[in-house]
Amino acid sequence: MLKPLIRRLIEMTVVMALVVTIVFVIVRIAPGDPAAMMLGPDATPQDVADLRVRLGLDQSLAVQYLRYVGGLLSGDLGQSIFLGQPVGAALLARAEPTFFLTLFSLLIACTIALPVGILSAYWRGSLFDQATTTLAMFAASVPSFWLGLVLMQVFAVKLGWFDPSGYGGPGAGLGTRLHHLVLPAVALGIVSSALIARFTRASMLDVLGDDFVRTARAKGMSEWQVVLGHAFKNALIPILTVIGLTAALLVSGAIVTETVFGLPGVGSLIVSAVLRRDYPVIQGALLVIAGLYVIINFVIDMLYLAVDPRVRY
Amino acid sequence: MTPAAAPSASSQPDVLPEGILLRVDGLKTHFGTGNRTAKAVDGVTFSLPRGRTVAVVGESGSGKSVTSLSIMGLIAPPGRIAGGRILHRDREGRVRDLARLTNADFRHIRGPEIAMIFQEPMTSLNPLMTVGEQIGEMIALHERISRGDLRRRVVELLKKVEIPAAESRADDYPHQMSGGMRQRAMIAMALACTPQLLIADEPTTALDVTIQAQILELMRRLQADMGMSMLFITHNLGVVAEIAHEVVVMYAGRVVEQAPAETLFGRPSHPYTRALLASTPDPDRDIAADGSRRPLAAIPGFVPSITNLPPGCAFAPRCPLAAQACRESPPELTTVAPGHVARCIRMEAA
Ligand SMILES: Nc1ncnc2c1ncn2[C@@H]1O[C@H](COP(=O)(O)OP(=O)(O)OP(=O)(O)O)[C@@H](O)[C@H]1O
Ligand SMILES: [Mg+2]
């Protein structure tokens, strides 16, 4: 158990090193002088030169890279140009809504998708199967921001059950904050449940035809023991990959949805950073998102290891 | 000759002669509906005496597996039992028709009354559970038992099927075992609740010849020791000779002959059985003293499609004895001698 863990950690470090380098290069090869672009057309050459020095852009690329990496290693993601705050602190301050939103959406997606997928595979060809297949196709083709707007219109504006926007203001209790996340999480969750449901169905169909399922029935197990205890556990292995993929997609989905619902999360931080060309923030956010992808992948791999005795990394 | 069994009617009472554990009576298991119906099993009739091994032989597609799955109640749509009865006597002596049992009732049959092992030991075990867990699951399903006792029972069972180092192999996952070991584990699982009847669907077909012989010997011994009945499905007459007390020969979804093993090998009645025996290699018969070989007598023609069976005897198109009457209506099972039945009107013509 320890050796594969160490190997995966080394692999993750390599991936992150590559990501850091790529992010660094992308920001540098973006056309134009970042300092001039940040300051806008009215800036004097002197202002631009000062900013270049402040940002370290007057140094050679190699020196900039080493400084940047050195900063990262000591946990320093750089300094935001507009927020007057370190990037790390800015991201951390915005992390909570994004984290909860992603987690809720994933929970909602799995809560809908797994039972639907299992049942439509078990009752393949039935009315239930056909109805959920159609619904899933519909859900998969709906953009989450559109669904978000519809939900907002109905449940916030018309029915008034939820606030249409915001995160409850400073000092709001956890309950209030979570209440604000319901609509965006449902919007995101429904859209991503389609993929998981389709995959669960396919994977279950595969497994339900397997010989060991027949063996389980021949033991005298009830259908639900067979389906959940034997079939689903085996079907879960490929489904885990899709859930991981969905979790990663949800992080980017959250960016758009946060903007729609005015949530002060990482997503809206990134959007405003892009609009204001706050390069250090964009750079830092990209790193954090890439880091999340890597961590999610790692978690999935570890789950594989825990679920499937045949897997040895 | 007298008819051995009147055409079954569901109005008949569920009675079973003493000494018979299971009687399949006019069983029909069909797949699909309309004119594309595959009549995989179409009027199978045979008896399974208590404490005996009955082998079911027949070419691929003759309905052997479908028959055994019907007995286990494991036919799933589009398949269905379209007719006939499967009379079974349980431990309490109660006789019931398994063809009409609810799924909830069937769960108490599967395991403690009738257990089954399958052809593919590689895929018939759940890859995510240790063999010990899978055997234990069978016991825990049907009995109240403490964890410690369960573990002891599992190890005992593994020893019973001669798995070396049973104590530690119990914690192996199926992929850590060879095919022969897995089949032993399957047997241990099937025997976990000491069933009255063990159905084995070609349990040795997927194994090496040497392993086959070991498994066969093990099953023969376990059957005798436990005094259970065994329904042993195979297409290998050599295996039949090793293990069976009685033989049921199937052709295109029907039983064409049932007889004690010695009778079937010594005085086969049905032309298909004779053809089957003639097409099976037998060194004593086929290799002369001077080393010359007699060619095997392959059966000419093909098994008819089960979606399009001929109106008369299904074997008639390939039968050397076939007469006009054979092509007109299917023959009944008739008694040749006590305990020996065959479905042929021309058997005296040989
Ligand atoms: N689920 C199913 N759907 C449709 N037809 C089926 C199904 N299962 C079996 N059959 C058909 O029933 C017939 C009998 O099949 P069965 O598996 O009982 O043959 P078998 O005697 O066991 O042959 P083998 O020696 O190859 O195992 C075959 O023609 C098969 O195509
Ligand atoms: Mg078969």
Image (tube, rainbow, N blue to C red):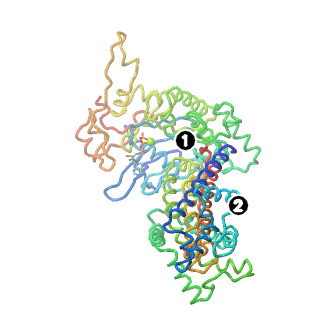
Give, as a three-letter code, the residue at label 2: Gly
Q: Is residue B50 left or right of residue B153?
A: left
Question: In percent of the image, x 54 and y 68: which residue is there?
Answer: A193
Q: Position of residue B273 (x, y in %)?
A: 37, 32
Q: Chain of mark 2?
A: A
Q: Nearer the viewer, residue A248 or A308?
A: A248
**Residue reaching furthest front?**
A46
* Quarter containing the N terminus of chain B: top left
Disc 2 versus disc 1: distance between alpha carbons?
Answer: 60 Å
Q: Is residue B237 above or below residue A68?
A: above
**Residue, disc 2:** A75
Q: Nearer the viewer, residue A147 or A79?
A: A79
Question: In percent of the image, x 44 and y 28: which residue is there?
Answer: B263
Q: Position of residue B16 (x, y in %)?
A: 53, 46
Q: Position of residue A5 (x, y in %)?
A: 67, 47
**Residue, disc 1:** B117
The residue carrying pointer 2 sits among few (fewer than 14), some (14 to 19) or many (20 or more) residues within 10 Å by Cα, namely few
Q: Is residue A288 left or right of residue B261?
A: right
Q: Position of residue B112 (x, y in %)?
A: 63, 46
The residue carrying pointer 1 sits among few (fewer than 14), some (14 to 19) or many (20 or more) residues within 10 Å by Cα, namely many
Q: Secondary structure at mark 2?
A: loop
Q: In the picture, residue B178 is in which quadrant?
A: top right
Q: Chain of mark 1?
A: B
Q: Which mark is residue A228?
A: none
Q: Is residue A105 above or below residue A5?
A: below
Q: Secondary structure at mark 1?
A: strand
Give, as a three-letter code, the residue at label 1: Ile
Q: Is residue A151 visible?
A: yes
